[in-house]
Image (cartoon, rainbow, N blue to C red):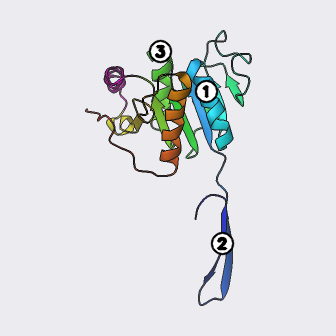
Amino acid sequence: MREHSSATRRYEDDSIEVFFDVNRPPSRLIIVGAVHIADALIHFARPLGYKTYLVDPRTAFATPERFPHVDAMVHAWGDEALPQIGLNSETAVVVITHDPKLDDPALKVALPSPAFYVGALGSPKTHAQRVERLLGEGLAPEHLNRLHAPIGLDIGGRTPAEIALSIIAEIVAVHNDVQLGERLPVSG
């Protein structure tokens, strides 16, 4: 049964009737990195029903003035914040700083988690370097194979809004179990 649906089922020769009402927990988008793409991601995610979190230890960047529409702002490193927020099967995590000091610790927590989507911004070259670092730090290849990178659907996006649209589109597709094209393989 799909989310927000209900149905009645009869069991054991129609002697038992059970009513099912399916309500998943709210979907959440956790954005690691208070960068220009984050605001556009927040604007796309909220109308789709996602509760949005912005995680960044840099208080000069992660401010209510820059991100007035985010549901929750967490001034902490990703590896500290993600366990506090809690990752479940209705959580998407995106890391978008281009800074391994911020991105990698968050990925090491998010990839083995039950989050339905984990993505990282960067070129194929950046992704290859990221994979090498994370494998070297002991992250299992099967966890790295969950990583959507380069993040987003290839729509030729150049502006922050276009890049955010491609990311949200990929998140929605994965959440709806749509089969996407091949991702970059992980060796190890």
- Above or below residue 157? Residue 15 is below
Rendered location of residue 44, percent (x, y): 62, 35
Secondary structure of the residue carrying numbered label 2: strand
Query: Are the residues tagged 1 and 2 within 8 Å (C-beta)?
Result: no
Residue type (three-letter) at the residue carrying disc 2: Ala
Secondary structure of the residue carrying numbered label 3: helix
Q: Is residue 179 left or right of residue 1?
A: left
Find disc 1 in the rendering and name its residue: 40
Mark number displayed over residue 7:
2
Rendered location of residue 112, percent (x, y): 45, 38
Instruction: Give the quarter of the image for residue 86.
Output: top right
Q: Residues within 10 Å of mark 1 (few under 14, many from 20)?
A: some
The residue closer to the viewer here, 12 or 116, is 116
Q: Residue at x 34, y 37 (%)?
A: 183
Q: CA distance from mark 2 to mark 3?
A: 48 Å
Looking at the image, tell me whether mark 1 or mark 2 is earlier in sequence order.
2
Mark number displayed over residue 101:
3
- Above or below residue 6? Residue 57 is above
Residue type (three-letter) at the residue carrying disc 3: Lys
Instruction: Give the quarter of the image for residue 62.
Output: top right
Q: Is residue 138 magenta?
A: yes
State the extent of the magenta-drawn residues as a range.
Answer: 123-139
- Above or below residue 138? Residue 58 is above
Say if residue 115 shows up in the picture.
no
Q: Residues within 10 Å of mark 2 (few under 14, many from 20)?
A: few
Which residue is the extreme one toward the left? 187
- Image quadrant holding the N terminus, namely bottom right
- Image quadrant holding the C terminus, namely top left
Q: Residue at x 35, y 43 (%)?
A: 181
